[in-house]
Structures are given as structure tokens and as C-alpha cells.
Amino acid sequence: MTDYTSIDFTPLDALTADEVVTHSPVRDVRLPSGNVLALITLDNGRDHTRPNTLGPATLAELGRTLATLKERAAKGEIHAVAITGKQYILAAGADLSDVAKLPSKEVARLIAQRGHQVIGSLSDLGVPTFAFVNGLALGGGLEIALNSTYRTVDASAAAVALPEVFLGIIPGWGGAYLLPNLIGIENALEVVISNPLKQNRMLKPKQAFDLGIMDAIFPAASYLEDSLRWADDVLTGRVRVERKNEPGKLERLTKWPIAIKMARGMLESKIGTVPRSPYVALDLLDKAKSGTKAEGFAREDEALADLITGDQFAASMYAFDLVQKRAKRPVGAPDKALAKRVTKVGVIGAGLMASQFALLFVRKLRVPVIITDLDQGRVDKGVASIREEIGKLEAKGRLDGDTANQLRALVHGTTDRSEFADCDFVIEAVFEEVGVKQEVFSAIEKIVAADAILATNTSSLSVAEIGSVLQNPERLVGFHFFNPVAVMPLIEVVKTDATSDAALSTAFVVAKGLGKNAVLTADAPGFVVNRLLAKVMGEAARAVYEGTPIAVVEKAFAPLGLPMGPFQLIDLVGWKVAAHVQDTMAHAFPDRFFSSENFHELAALPEVVEKDKGGRVTGWTKAAQKVLVTGKTPVAPETILARVQNGLAQEIHIMLDEGVVPEVQDIDLCLILGAGWPFIDGGASPYLDREGASQRAFGDTFHHPPIRGIGG
């Protein structure tokens, strides 16, 4: 058992210079019964846009506060302690801003131990403790609640979560031990592992209450008053707290090991074995079924110290910074004051992609949206599809009835393109061929106003070539969405030499209005994401055509940590689309990109690959085997991996030299947001540096020094 009181925490003091300290003032509240409750209110003195965080100085102050309250409790001056936060926020977790400055694993361990010492003392004050979760409670914020005796939550709180696995670490201040022993192993697996891996999904207050994380839930208008009254009822015995999901002996003996085994199988099939934190978290949850709390905390100390000093966490923090900061302030975006106000949107096309565009525009911008196509049948089908999707959102409770009806009324379809005359922003979703897009824009340009913005959703074609037939090519901008449109957060905004600042500014403002992150790219083949995915898919195809079995090729790509293998990816985007992108890249750069006519023969088949229940590609269909012509020189997995690593490093280096994006951070941001490149890699460039591919490809690294953990 670790004696936290005997540990020297002074090395943490060196990390507090830039810390925004969250203070812990206390006031006594006399409850109706006469009991006195000491109420701590965490507050960093900033407005609600800067959440409370738990850095070393914050924890030291909170530790002193709790020690004083323990003394007062022993004297009988107080009968309970409660902890809450400033308006809207309890705490957003540990302050990770200075973690990169950690000098050693020993100091990293002190961070875990300090959290256990201070937050863990909430269960050892000599009186009951209450967490009043009045707002956002993430990571260490939720662990404050878990270490308390009882918990209430504000029904309007923004989110409750343990997101650590998403960042390459684990809940290290009690969460990995306390949560499964509070709500059972299956629920804990969902909160600690599954939700972070689902794009960092968080719990709403009602979900946290239903799971048994919270003991009571109260409305925002009277939250503190209700919580204080409830606490008094608990203290006087008028309310007895029952925890229906708390695991019993039978669950620990039978359900627990089965749930862990199933979770491990799910992880291996969904994310492979490269990410470390989900498996470390799984082991901690497994061991939480027995032993003491002190033993559980000691395991968390070691696990957190190990992960926080590793490469994956360093890369995750780099990626997190990109998504939280760089994505919100796009590099190269003109002044938003130059943007044209968009009051009506036109969508050319009425197929699946066009319908997704129209639904997104009408939901987010709440302006009239008009769609068109070659005949009325297609138009009617498109409008019906959009209205059906609005109905589904209404059925799920994500839209109320009035809003759903308003959105349906804003969608209109026509074959008469003259109705586009008053559109401010027109986007095409037609066949991926330059001539078709040129024809569409030439026709619509004669109808819309001179200052209307035209946007092409091309995935790899030259925006300048598409705009070369226009009278006013400066109004054309690339506006490349990723599929599925509603889910994927990236839009590549493509600028040609002719594109005006007004058009570009409008594109960025519209992207933000749609809830997307926009990254500026030059008008280069494939832009960023498709250019690099074409490199990945091309190297996979090259290995197969040399004679390597498809399962071996898929396995060779596993260390990249991508959400799916190359052929699973091709199958998802569609073989015709993949073949087209591959052709575009091979035509532009024949010496660097692989292309095969066999690809088009395969693309013509209804089914090309066979998959297992987990969606992993296991082989070719019989029809594909008849079409496929391969060599007889299979390649070893390590050779395939080295090829794709070297190829990606070379291509990214060339893209930076060409000025496709301003900096390598923009390429990483695009890959994270548009291709699901894992946080634990930090995008592609930190991974390629660590693997030595950058040195092999161009004799240098993308980052100086390379982004590595303390143990790296």
C-alpha cells in the first residue's frame, strides 16, 4: 500500500509556473436539520470559456483545504463536506498543458500519486462527502465525484465522461478502480473504453444517473438548493441511497471475466493491437473485481506513469492541440468580414451525396435549400429522401415537431434552374468528371447573381480546370466534403490562383456554420487526404498484384493504426471511386503512384472482397478471383509496411515543398479529421518520424525534435 503522505511532491512545483490555478474556497451552509455542510466551490477566476482544470498547484491547494476540513470534522464543527464548481463547470480534468515538460517517469508517477492523495482523501474526511456535479465533469472532474460518498448532477450539465483512453492514457485518479465497483463491469467498459473510442462520446446527465454514476439528478433552476436539501435528507436518514448497478459477488465471479474477454476480442477486431491505452485500461478494469482500493490506486499510479511518458500520449497531445486550437483558427482563412451573407443555397444534383449536402445545409444554416437534377423523378426522389431523414431525426428526439416542419418547408426541388437565380451559394454534387462539372457551372453562372459563390465538391480534380470555362472564375472555390457528410468533421477548402478572398472567406464561414473544420489547401491533385490515401491504397494494390495474399497485405498495414485496412477502406469508399482517385493520382504523378487496369475490372463487379463478421477483409470473391491477374512474387509484411511508410513520408515532404498546405500540422489535421488517422499517431508525420521513414525518405524529420514521449 502506498503511503501518499510520505511522498515528496516538490518536483511537481516546477510544473506550476504557467498553471491557471483553480482555487477551492469554502463556505459553511447550515442545513434545515441543523447540520453544517462545508461547501467547496472550485473556481479558476476565469469566465466559463476557460474551464476549471486540476494542475499540481490546484491539487496542492485543494489538499490543504481538505486537510483543514478533516480537522474541523474531527472537532465536530462540520457534519458533511460537499464540492461543486463555478457556473456550468465542475472540472475538465487534469491540466495537461505542461505534461510535455515532465523530466522523468518518476515525476510522471507523482502526478498520479498527487491526484490519489488529494482527491482520494474525499473518502477519508471522517464525515460523508457529496459531489454536486453542477456542470462539465471530465476525467479528474468526474473522479472527484467518484471519490466522494454521494453524487448529484445538474440535469443541464454539458457532459460527464472519462475520456482518457481517447488521449492515450487511463483514468488514473481512481476512475479505473472505483467506477466498475460502482456501476458494474459492463457499464464501466462502456464509459472507460467504448465511449472514448467512439470519437470521444460523452454521457448526458440523465445517462450518468441511469448508469448509477450519479445518485440524484435535479433541474438547473434549483440545482444547488435541491442538492443541499437532498444531502440533508441523506444525513438525517430520510433518504436511503440504493445503487442498483453495484456489482455483487456473482457478477465478480462469472459476468466480470466474460465481459473482459469479449471486450478484448472487440478491441482486437476494431482497433488492432497497436493502441496501448485501451488494453491497459482493460487490464485495470479486470483487476478491479478484487483486492483493496489502495491496491487499485497503486496499479493506476504505475499505469499512468508508464503511459504518460510514452510516444502514444505525446503524439495524442500533439493531435489534441491541432484539433482544439489549429482547427478552430484555420491558417490562411481571409477576414470573415469579406464573406458574402448566405440566405439561400443551391445544390446541383439530387443523388445520395447531394441529398446529404442539402440536409446538412438546411439543418445547420436554416436557410432555403433548392436541389435540381436531370429529370423530375430524380428530383422528387432526392427531396423525399431529405424529408425522410428529417423525420428520422424527429423520431429520435433530435428535432422537435415544429423545427422538423420548418426544415421540410425550407427544402425544394425543381428541374427549372432559373429558380437558382437568388442563390448566394451553389454547390455541385455531380459525376466526377471535369467536362460534366464545367457544363454544370457554365449553365448556372448565367443564372445566378454576379457575386454568388460557386463551390465544387470534387475529390481529386483540378478546381482551376473546372473553373476555366467560367466568365468569373474568381467566384469558384473547392469545397470537398468527406463521407458520411453528417459525421466527418473535415472540409478541404481549395484555393486556385483565381479564387477571390470573398469566395474563400465565404467558404470558411459557411464551413463553420455547418459545424465543420475547414483546412485551406492549394489546387493540387487529390488535395491532402485523397492524395495520401491513394498512396496507402496504391501500395496495398501493388503488393496484391505482385502475388501477396490479401489477408497478408491487410495485416501488414496494422501497425499504421488506421481505423480499417486498405481493402476495407476501398470497399467502404467504393471500388469505382477508389479506381478513379487512383487513376487521377497515377496520371498526375506516374512515377510515384500505382495504378492498374485490373482495378477497373474489379470495380465493375457487384462484390469484390469477402469479409468476416467484424468487417475485416479476408479474401477475394470468386468473381474477383476470375478477374484478378497477379504475379508470383509475394512480398513480406515488413517490406509492404516500409514501402507505405517511406512513400507517405516522401509524398508529404513533396506536398510541403509544393505548398499544398502551409505546414505539416495542416496535413496531420486533415488526416485526423478526414481519414480517422489515430490520435495515438498524432496524424502521420510524428509517426513517420518515430519509425525512421522520414530519415529514409528525405534524410531529415518533419519535427525538430521528433515528437516522442519521455521513454521514447
Image: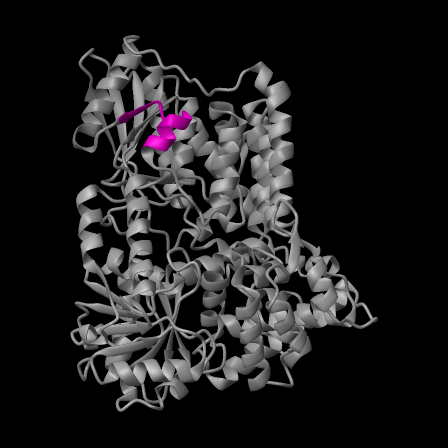
Q: Position of residue 142 (x, y in %)?
A: 40, 35
Q: Residue furthest top?
A: 237
The quarter of the displayed image where residue 258 is located: top right
Q: Position of residue 441 (x, y in %)?
A: 31, 82
The N terminus appears in which quarter of the rendering? top right
Q: Is residue 283 magenta?
A: no
Q: Residue at x 66, y 47 (%)?
A: 612
Whether residue 219 sits left or right of residue 144 in the image: it is left
Q: Position of residue 165 (x, y in %)?
A: 52, 45
Q: Which residues are magenta?
A: 206-217
Q: Residue at x 42, y 29 (%)?
A: 146
Say which of 251 and 122 sits in front.
Answer: 251
Whether residue 201 sits left or right of residue 6 in the image: it is left
On screen, 162 above or below 683? above
On screen, 263 above or below 392? above
Say which of 354 and 654 sits in front.
Answer: 354
* Residue 376 visible, this orientation: yes
* Residue 171 visible, this orientation: no
The quarter of the displayed image where residue 652 is located: bottom right
Q: Position of residue 247 (x, y in %)?
A: 52, 19
